[in-house]
Every structure is written in structure tokens, then in C-alpha cells.
């Protein structure tokens, strides 16, 4: 319990410091004319104007990667090893960071290219069409993630435990969830934490079962975990979250449309279409994310609570649910009973003790 509290406190502090650090870097970059200077320098050597945004984004990404490296190194490598949660070699961690950076650059460039293109051709309604593109792109990415993104970091194969596989497939059929198959993913090469996921959309929808969970949990406990994941689909939580996130995206871009002129003047920028204004757009996302996070966390906790209830009802196995929760809390060093303020801002799942108490009070 003490180790879990210490680990959790460190994660909370790092999350807050990371957000403040990024906000400060963006504000300094804008306030001291560094953004304008970089954009001007690149414009002087780049003749083809459509390459300015990719070059500016790359330069900013490299600079941020260097400035943020000590923070990321401690938060995602040293801290995990300090609490015996990581099994990854330093060289493998560095490779993963490079791959994450490259993927992040490509995805961000696609989104920003659409942003600047639409901004140019539709200055009055760009906020709507950009939002639409970002929403559609997010859906496409969700469909492609299991077959393109995840294999870049993990290897997974069809689950070899046939009894467990058939049990999960039967559970999916019982809960009217169509899945491609059940796969085992080699989590243990990177982390000792346990997890399971229901990922993809349409024909790419599948179950990914971490070997760290498969090897340490009973079939009953694993069934409860997957019943919870399938419950999200059956209760249409995925669709509701897509709609909610779409509304947030639309609201954010409309806010930028209505207010950006003031901040452009404040930072001495000419237009939102200038590459130099890119850090301002990022700053909007950071601040808006902080403001909306408690509401998003609250909605998520409600959905998770509903999924727990349906999982208990479907499996009718209260004992397995409680033992699974206790194992997860110990293995992942979860904060079982956080301060209300911490729960309000950070927790997108109900705390473990609340979930266990709910199960104990259920009529199952």
C-alpha cells in the first residue's frame, strides 16, 4: 500500500509538472519571438511554401524532444524501474521513444496539414471542416491501430490457450460483440503491469490479452476483465465517447476561431495561417485539455461503473471480480483510495476500493 501511494504521488506530480512545463515552453516560445524567428529563418531557405509547416513542426518537435528528454526519461523509465514495474532494456526504451516520436510527427503533420489547408480555402468556416476532418481521421486511426501501430511496439499472436480462447469467444457471442479473434501480446518484455484491451473497429476489432495478465490470473478472473470491456460496447459507451469527443473537438476549434485574433495580437503574430502561430494552437489544446479533463474523467468513471455492473451481472461471479481487482491493484501499484481532489482530476476509472465495495454490495 505504501509503495502504491508513493508511486501514485510521483505520477500525479509528474503529470502536473509536465503540463506546466509544456505550457511554459510554449508561452516562452511565443512571447520572446522565438516562433516568429524560427518561421522566418525556415522561410528564408525553403522555396516551396508547402514544406514550411513540415519543417517548422520537425524543428519544434526535435527541440521539445531534447528539452523534455530528462523529464520523460525519469517519468517513463527510471520511475518504473524504481518501483520494479519495468522489464525493458534502456536500448529498447530509447528505440520505442524514437518510434513514438516518428509516429507522433507523422500523425500531427497530417492533422496540421488539413488544418492549414482548410484555413486557407475556407477562412469563415474552417473550424467546422477542420473538426470534421480530425474526427474522421480519429475513427480511421482507431480502425488501423491494431494492424499498424501496435505491432510496431509489441508482438502478438493468436491465444494458444484454446480453452480460454473459446471461453472468451463464447462470452463475446453471449454479449453480442463481434470480434476477429483473441490475441496474446508480449507485455512482459516491457512492463510487469497487467492489462487487456478490446481494440479496433469493424473488421479489425479484436481482444488483446497481455501475457502478464494471462499467466497470473484465473480463467474466471480473465472472463470478468473481458466482460467489462465488452460491456462498454454493449452499453454503447464507445459511440457516446466518440460523440462527446467530437463535440469537444468542435468546441475547441470554434473557441480558437472566436478568440485567436486577440492572442495573435498579444504575441505579435500576423495570422493563424502563419507557421509561427502553430505553438499558439498547441497552447490552446493544452489549456483546453486541463479545463475539460475533470468533466471527461467524470463521464468516464460513470461509464466504467456501468460496465462493472454489467460485467458482474453477465458473469455472475462476484468472487472472481473482487480477486481480480485486488490482484490488479497490487500488480499495477494502483492508488486504491485516492484523495477526492486527485480522483476528481486524474481518475477516469473509479478507485479500486470503490469498485470492490460496489461488487460486495451487489445482489449477484
Image (cartoon, rainbow, N blue to C red):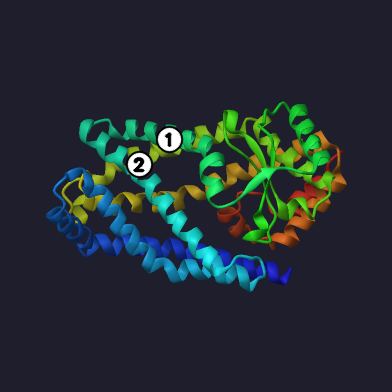
Write the residue at 48% across / 38% down.
Answer: 141
Residue located beneath label 2 in the image: 110
Circle 2 sits in a helix, a strand or a loop, which is it?
helix
Q: CA distance from mark 2 to mark 1?
A: 9 Å
Image quarter for residue 137?
A: top left
Q: Position of residue 311 (x, y in %)?
A: 76, 38
Q: Quadrant of the N terminus?
A: bottom right
- Residue neighbourhood size for the residue with mark 2, other residues' Cα within 10 Å, grouped as few (<14), some (14–19), many (≥20): few
Label 2 close to label 1 by CB (< 8 Å): yes
- Image label count: 2
Mark 1 residue element: helix
Give whichever of 6, 170 is nearer the camera. 170
Q: In the displayed structure, does residue 170 sit left or right of residue 307?
A: right
Residue underneath mark 1 = 137
Give the crowd class for mark 1: few <14, some 14-19, many >=20 residues within 10 Å.
some
**Point 75% across, 27% down: residue:** 173
Residue 230 seen in this snapshot: yes
Whether 124 is drawn above or below 43: the answer is above
Q: Nearer the viewer, residue 115 or 212?
A: 212
Say which quadrant the C terminus sits in.
top right
Q: Is residue 229 left or right of residue 165?
A: left
For residue 206, above or below residue 38? above
Amino acid at each position: 500500500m505504501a509503495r502504491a501511494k508513493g508511486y501514485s504521488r510521483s505520477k500525479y506530480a509528474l503529470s502536473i509538472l509536465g503540463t506546466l512545463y509544456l505550457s511554459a515552453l510554449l508561452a516562452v516560445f511565443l512571447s520572446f519571438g522565438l516562433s516568429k524567428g524560427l518561421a522566418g529563418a525556415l522561410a528564408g531557405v525553403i522555396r516551396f511554401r508547402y514544406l514550411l509547416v513540415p519543417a517548422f513542426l520537425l524543428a519544434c518537435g526535435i527541440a521539445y524532444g531534447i528539452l523534455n528528454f530528462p523529464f520523460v526519461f525519469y517519468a517513463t523509465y527510471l520511475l518504473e524501474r524504481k518501483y520494479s514495474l519495468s522489464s525493458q532494456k534502456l536500448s529498447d526504451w530509447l528505440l520505442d521513444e524514437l518510434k513514438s516520436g516518428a509516429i507522433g510527427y507523422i500523425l500531427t503533420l497530417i492533422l496540421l496539414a488539413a488544418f492549414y489547408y482548410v484555413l486557407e480555402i475556407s477562412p469563415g468556416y474552417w473550424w467546422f471542416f477542420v473538426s470534421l476532418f480530425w474526427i474522421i481521421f480519429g475513427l480511421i486511426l482507431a480502425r488501423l491501430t491494431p494492424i499498424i501501430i501496435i505491432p510496431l511496439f509489441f508482438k502478438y499472436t493468436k491465444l494458444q490457450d484454446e480453452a480460454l480462447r473459446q471461453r472468451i469467444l463464447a462470452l463475446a457471442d453471449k454479449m453480442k460483440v463481434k470480434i476477429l479473434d483473441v490475441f496474446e501480446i508480449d507485455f512482459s518484455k516491457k512492463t510487469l503491469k497487467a492489462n487487456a484491451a478490446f481494440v479496433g473497429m469493424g473488421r479489425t476489432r479484436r481482444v488483446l490479452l497481455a501475457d502478464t495478465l494471462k499467466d497470473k490470473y484465473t480463467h474466471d478472473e480473465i472472463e470478468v476483465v473481458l466482460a467489462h470491456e465488452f460491456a462498454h460496447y454493449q452499453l454503447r459507451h464507445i459511440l457516446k465517447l466518440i460523440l462527446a469527443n467530437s463535440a469537444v473537438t468542435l468546441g475547441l476549434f470554434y473557441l480558437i476561431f472566436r478568440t485567436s485574433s486577440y492572442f495573435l495580437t498579444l504575441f505579435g503574430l500576423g495570422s493563424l495561417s502563419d507557421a509561427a502561430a502553430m505553438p499558439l494552437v498547441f497552447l490552446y489544446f493544452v489549456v483546453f485539455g486541463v479545463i475539460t479533463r475533470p468533466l471527461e474523467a467524470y463521464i468516464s468513471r460513470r461509464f466504467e461503473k456501468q460496465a462493472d455492473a454489467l460485467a458482474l451481472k453477465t458473469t455472475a461471479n462476484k468472487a472472481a471480480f473482487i480477486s481480480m481487482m485486488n490482484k490488479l491493484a497490487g500488480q499495477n501499484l494502483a492508488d486504491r483510495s485516492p484523495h477526492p481532489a486527485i480522483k476528481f482530476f486524474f481518475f477516469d476509472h473509479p478507485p479500486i476500493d470503490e469498485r470492490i465495495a460496489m461488487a460486495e454490495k451487489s445482489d449477484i
